Amino acid sequence: MTFPQLAIIVTVAAFSIAATYILVRIFDKLYRTSAAEQAKDVVQRAQLEADTKIRETELRIKEQTIQLKENNEREFQKIREEIYEKERLLNKRQDTLDRQADDQRKQERLVENTQRKLSERVADADRKNAELAKLIEKERITLHEFSGLNRQEATDRLLGLLEKELQTETGRVILQHEKNLKERCDAVALDMLLSALQRYAASHTAETTTASVDVPNDETKGRIIGREGRNIRSFEKAAGVDLLIDDTPGVVLVSCFDPIRREIAHRALTRLIADGRIHPARIEEIVAESQKEIHKFILKKGKDAVQEAGLFGLNERLVELLGRLHFRTSYSQNVLRHSVEVAFIAGAIAAELGMNQKLARRCGLLHDIGKSMDHETEGTHAKIGADLLKRYGEPQEVVLAAAGHHDDPRLENPYTMMVMTADASSAARPGARRESLDLYVKRMQELEAIAKEFSGVAQVFAIQAGREMRVMLTSEKSTDETAAKICRDIAKALTERVQFPGEIRVTVIRETRFVETAR
């Protein structure tokens, strides 16, 4: 490389360095100018934001001041209203006190006037009594003068009149004693009957049920009907019932007047549905097996009733007829349970009278035996039962009790009277007929609830099937006088608010107990 070329290169390099330096300085100056402007803009924006914040803060302080002022005004207004209300109440109370003071002054004046009038009347009464005594003495003297009788003769005549009146009164007293004696005899008889009823209490009612069979689906209904109805015809012919199959989902009804056949059909149809094989041959087989089961069940029920009554030696046919009464109801009362109850009540009455208890229970247990055959034989159940008992060699007292327990009493046979009494008591006892056990319990609770409404009542017990109420009072909240009033008020409330047969005896008991422990 030559020297001129090197000089050119150095010159060019020096020129480039100078140009670069100049450009750098220019760019630096421009950058500094732009940064200053940006800083100025930032300061201006910050100043604007600060001014805005200050104005917002001032506005918020003003709003809070106004809100605080309004709250203070409301508080002051509320305090003023309360002060005004208290002043009004004080003024009203002052007016009331003034009126009471006026009324008291009026009453004091009225009492003073009444006392003065009373004193005047007492004085007038004393004066009139003195005048009356003088008039009586004067009339006595005049009477002696007109009658011509002395004191002794007048006394004798008066004693004679008194003796006649005494004879009349004596006859009245004798009649009263006879009436009281009759009432006591009736009370003793009633007490004996109630004692017999309380010594035995069985379930009285049979809940009303429908002979229905549950089926799982409509396909099962079709299988029960069978092709062209052959299955349902075979079942109705074998069981002696009618099957009612309608659109009701899941139910088939068994209809029959005879409750035993209805129960046989119910069991047979239930077993057929569970088994699944429904055809005429299987139907006849299942119905026959159900008949045997029901026969065993009837015998068991009859034997259980005989053992419960404590009787032995009955003919097996009579035991079976007794078991049939389990499926018979009278006014919703199960006839078998009714017969067992009559047996126990009659036996209790016989025990009170010192007569044969077992014979009385036998009469009571078999008195309705005719109801097991009254659908198959003509005549009343009393006549049918008497004929059956006579045919199977039962004692004459049992036959007469079955024949006459609904007729006029035969005084020559006291066991018939016992059975009639026990039968009427079992049928008429509250809760035995025409109402379910739930209604009976509800009525007892209603009686107790009425008595508990009265102040001072601690406990209430409805006993003797609702014929008597025992009310326990708290001694702290009642006295002997208030106890008598509570008793009368409870009896009045029961009369006005409850419908019941016969009478309800209300007994109120109040006692004071003191208990200490010796250590």
Image (spheres, grey):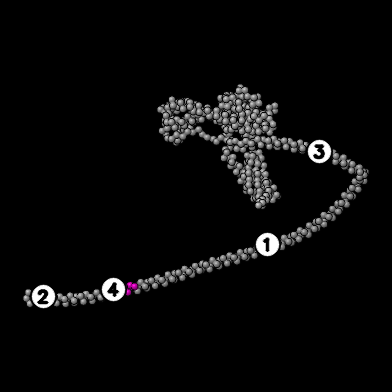
Residue 45 counted in the magenta span: yes
Q: CA distance from mark 4 to mark 1?
A: 92 Å
Residue 5 counted in the magenta span: no
| Vertical arrangement, residue 453 with respect to residue 223, above or below | below
Amino acid type assigned to the residue bearing label 4 in the image: Gln
Q: Residue furthest top?
A: 391
Residue 470 place in picture, x, y as percent: 65, 44
Q: Earlier in the sequence, mark 1 or mark 2?
A: 2
Residue 9 got which mark? 2
Type of secondary structure dominating the magenta stretch: helix
Q: Which residue is mark 3?
A: 170
Q: CA distance from mark 2 to mark 4?
A: 43 Å
Q: Which residue is mark 4?
A: 38
Amino acid type assigned to the residue bearing label 1 in the image: Gln
The residue mark sitting in front, 1 or 3, is 3
Amino acid type assigned to the residue bearing label 2 in the image: Ile
Residue visible at 77% across and 37% down in the picture: 177
Q: Residue furthest front?
A: 519
The residue mark sitting in front, 4 or 1, is 4
Labels 1 and 3 touching (C-beta < 8 A): no
Q: Which residue is mark 1?
A: 100
Q: Tell me if residue 405 can be seen.
A: no
The residue mark sitting in front, 2 or 4, is 2
The magenta-colored residue range is 36-46
In-image side of 61 versus 501 (left or right): left
Q: Earlier in the sequence, mark 4 or mark 1?
A: 4
Q: Tell me if residue 356 can be seen.
A: yes
In-image side of 296 versus 150 (left or right): left
The residue mark sitting in front, 1 or 2, is 2
Residue visible at 62% across and 35% down in the picture: 200
